């Protein structure tokens, strides 16, 4: 029985797959199950099967990097590569595909070359690929491989000085391969025999040490990374190996009495008197005033006075402290003196009251400005200048996205990166300091940038059109009953860009066929507002918004429906330059009342007419100057403004030889004619000679006849 059991376990271990499935479906054919994913970087390779780790509940392929734009070769292995019909590596914003995903020459894996864009800042980096395979039928499968790039911080520390005096602060450098990889909080530990903090200054990481009790002490300093890396146990971690040291803390030459308040605020205008607790010493006299100076020798700068009131049960003394100056712990000790003789030693920070002297903003790397007006959706840098700023807590009332720049934070300057929400409803964002309004506010200013005029629509009889679609003169062959102007509110604010309220004006000119100005009107105070569907729709003040449709005839005294043929309606839309800074837009719409023909009475003087009377042989001799009064039609060219065709046709009366007063002339007669004429196409001719032709009926001779001949036309 034991042999069978051993044989069973041996078979289980032998046939147990060393592969894994990212996504598998129970099919009966050949499913190209993902066997392994390998990244080759330089000469090293990192495989999912051996370098994959479980982090944040997801298995991820971990690999180290040195350069943030590392180039890597990707290899994807499948159990049945012959079943794959199509494949694709899906695009990503985190890398560029240098060589497309293709089968290797050996046909046992797919390969591609990638260049990562920025591994130092990439979040949720992953490889996504899709394929179609033959599993007794074509099927699809999608794979997602999460990547975990990491850079292990390299830290070296050598204790420059293993002796400290109680109350003294020592600063030492920590060698770090890349300071940006460390999480630096810049905060002191509290209530330890040796307090420490980690800070960064000009690209250097520094260790601050301060002993509180004399003696030999073992100190352990734990450093943490900003991003996880693979530790010695092969698992992701944020914790670096601890730094351990032994410190010899020595008693100060003078007795050190600790003030149990690390930071004391001094009001430079009104001074400061406050109650504090100080360590007790048997030689410290009660109900006595001691001087506090910045040097042991006589003649030091007076920092304050301390009056001992009573001893407490906690082995401390309750004191009144009166301050006259500022002091920093790193500037040295403070000496408690009886007269000019130093009797005790202490140290604390005496800092000015936190005040803000100036708040400035910078947009898109531009110059810093005191103008605190911001716009919805805007990203900007905000800088606070003042005193003791590092001791204050700042927040922005109504703003959740405010990231503090840890590099630019000190007692005189703090910088934030702000993102103003697109749908913010407040008119002001208050800068809150220590839970109270600091008096500085960011004012929300709505966008008022000029937008191209594609949101204006006009209807002159053919339905509404965007004015930007009207790029040429409109020839309209019907009566313009009304010209309607409307605004398309949904087209003003775009999802990714806001323009705000559009302040407009329009100039309307009505002119005749001869370009004589008939009427001029200026329409002012037009305001097109974005719709309620805009993310900023509820925030706009709509008191001055133009509501409804603007009807031109309600403004004009000469109505468009009464205009003569070939009259022109010219409307110029433009932004008001006093309300929109920067570039503004304008657009002109011209509507001409086109006619295809016209009817009028024309008087002309045909001369030298050749007539042919029906029923008689031959043609009559050339006649003299005749007089024709014709009700005729003139025809216009379809694509030109008031451009006549060279021919006309009409019906009227023709007095043959009307200006021949010879009483013996029998050719004088009056005819009813249908007459056509051909005129020169040039308009600038004052004297022209048209050609006439037609037929008619002679009244006196009662005969039908045909005629043709020239005439004389004088244009004044």
Image (spheres, rainbow, N blue to C red):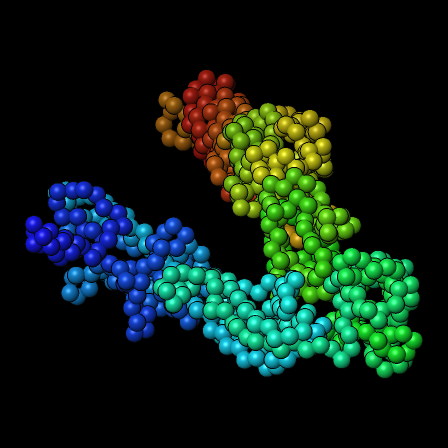
Q: Nearer the viewer, residue 493 or 477?
A: 493
Residue lying at 89% horizontally and 69% vertically, measured from the top left = 290
Residue 511: x %, y % from top left: 66, 36
Residue lying at 30% horizontally and 65% vertically, measured from the top left = 46
Q: Is residue 679 left or right of residue 294?
A: left
Instruction: Kindly tell me whether residue 586 is visible in this rendering.
Output: no
Q: Which of 610 and 103 is in front in this view?
A: 103
Residue 157: x %, y % from top left: 53, 77
Q: Is residue 6 left or right of residue 254?
A: left
Instruction: Kindly tell me whether residue 41 is visible in this rendering.
Output: yes
Residue lying at 47% horizontally and 62% vertically, measured from the top left = 238
Residue 234: x %, y % from top left: 36, 64
Residue lying at 69% horizontally and 36% vertically, measured from the top left = 541
Q: Which of 553 and 492 is in front in this view?
A: 492
Q: Which of 370 and 706 is in front in this view?
A: 370
| Position of the C terminus by quadrant | top right
Q: How many labels does the image show?
A: 0
Quadrant in the rendering for residue 529? top right
Residue 325: x %, y % from top left: 85, 68
Quadrant in the rendering for residue 354? bottom right
């Amino acid at each position: 029985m034991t042999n069978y059991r051993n044989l069973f376990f041996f078979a289980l271990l032998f046939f147990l797959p060393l592969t894994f499935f990212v996504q598998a479906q129970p099919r009966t054919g050949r499913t190209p199950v993902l066997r392994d994913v390998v990244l080759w970087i330089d000469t090293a390779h990192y495989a999912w099967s051996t370098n994959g780790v479980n982090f944040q509940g997801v298995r991820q392929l971990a690999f180290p990097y040195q350069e943030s734009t590392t180039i890597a070769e990707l290899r994807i292995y499948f159990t049945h590569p012959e079943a794959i019909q199509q494949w694709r590596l899906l695009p990503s914003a985190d890398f560029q595909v240098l060589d497309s995903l293709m089968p290797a020459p050996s046909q046992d894996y797919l390969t591609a070359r990638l260049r990562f864009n920025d591994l130092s800042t990439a979040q949720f980096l992953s490889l996504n690929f899709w394929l179609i395979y033959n599993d007794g039928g074509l099927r699809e499968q999608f794979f997602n491989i999460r990547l975990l790039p990491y850079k292990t911080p390299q830290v070296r520390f050598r204790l420059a000085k293993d002796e400290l005096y109680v109350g003294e602060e020592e600063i030492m450098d920590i060698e770090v391969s890349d300071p940006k990889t460390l999480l630096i909080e810049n905060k002191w530990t509290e209530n330890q025999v040796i307090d420490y903090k980690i800070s960064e200054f000009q690209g250097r990481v520094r260790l601050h040490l301060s002993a509180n009790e004399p003696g030999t002490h073992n100190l352990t300093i734990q450093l943490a990374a900003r991003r996880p890396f693979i530790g010695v146990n092969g698992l992701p971690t944020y914790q670096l190996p601890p730094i351990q040291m032994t410190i010899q803390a020595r008693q100060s030459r003078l007795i050190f009495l600790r003030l149990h308040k690390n930071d004391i605020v001094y009001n430079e205008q009104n001074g400061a008197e406050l109650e504090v607790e100080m360590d007790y010493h048997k030689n410290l006299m009660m109900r006595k005033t001691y001087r506090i100076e910045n040097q042991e020798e006589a003649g030091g700068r007076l920092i304050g006075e301390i009056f001992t009131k009573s001893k407490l049960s906690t082995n401390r003394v309750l004191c009144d402290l009166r301050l006259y100056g500022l002091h920093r712990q790193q500037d040295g000790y403070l000496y408690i003196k009886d007269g000019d003789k130093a009797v005790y030693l202490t140290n604390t920070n005496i800092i000015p009251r936190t005040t803000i002297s100036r708040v400035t903003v910078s947009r898109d790397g531009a110059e810093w400005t005191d103008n605190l007006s911001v716009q919805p959706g805007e990203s900007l840098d905000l800088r606070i200048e003042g005193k003791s700023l590092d001791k204050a807590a700042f927040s922005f009332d109504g703003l959740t996205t405010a990231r503090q720049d840890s590099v630019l934070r000190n007692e005189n300057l703090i910088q934030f990166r702000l993102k103003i929400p697109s749908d913010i409803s407040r008119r002001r964002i208050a800068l809150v300091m220590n839970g109270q309004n600091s008096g500085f506010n960011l004012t929300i200013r709505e966008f008022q940038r000029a937008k191209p005029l594609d949101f204006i629509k006009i209807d002159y009889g053919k339905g509404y059109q965007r004015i930007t679609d009207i790029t040429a003169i409109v020839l309209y062959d019907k009566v313009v009953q009304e010209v309607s102007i409307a605004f398309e509110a949904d087209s003003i604010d775009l999802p990714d860009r806001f323009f705000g309220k559009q302040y407009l004006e329009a100039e309307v000119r009505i002119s005749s066929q001869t370009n004589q100005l008939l009427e001029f009107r200026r329409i002012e105070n037009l305001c097109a507002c974005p719709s309620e569907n805009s993310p900023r729709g509820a925030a706009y003040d709509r008191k001055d918004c133009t509501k409804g449709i603007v009807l031109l005839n309600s403004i004009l005294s000469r109505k468009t429906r009464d205009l003569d043929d070939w009259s022109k309606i010219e409307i110029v839309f433009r932004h008001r330059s006093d309300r929109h800074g920067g570039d503004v837009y304008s657009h002109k719409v011209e509507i001409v009342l086109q006619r295809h023909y016209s009817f009028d009475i024309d008087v002309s003087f045909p001369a030298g007419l050749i007539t042919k009377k029906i029923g008689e042989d031959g043609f009559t001799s050339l006649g003299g100057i005749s007089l024709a009064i014709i009700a005729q039609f003139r025809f216009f060219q379809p694509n030109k403004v008031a451009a006549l065709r060279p021919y006309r046709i009409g019906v009227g009366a023709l007095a043959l030889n009307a200006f021949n007063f010879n009483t013996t002339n029998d050719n004088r007669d009056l005819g009813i004619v249908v007459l056509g004429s051909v005129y020169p196409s040039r308009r600038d001719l004052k004297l022209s000679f048209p050609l006439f032709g037609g037929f008619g009926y002679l009244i006196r001779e009662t005969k039908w006849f045909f005629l043709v001949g020239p005439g004389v036309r004088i244009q004044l």
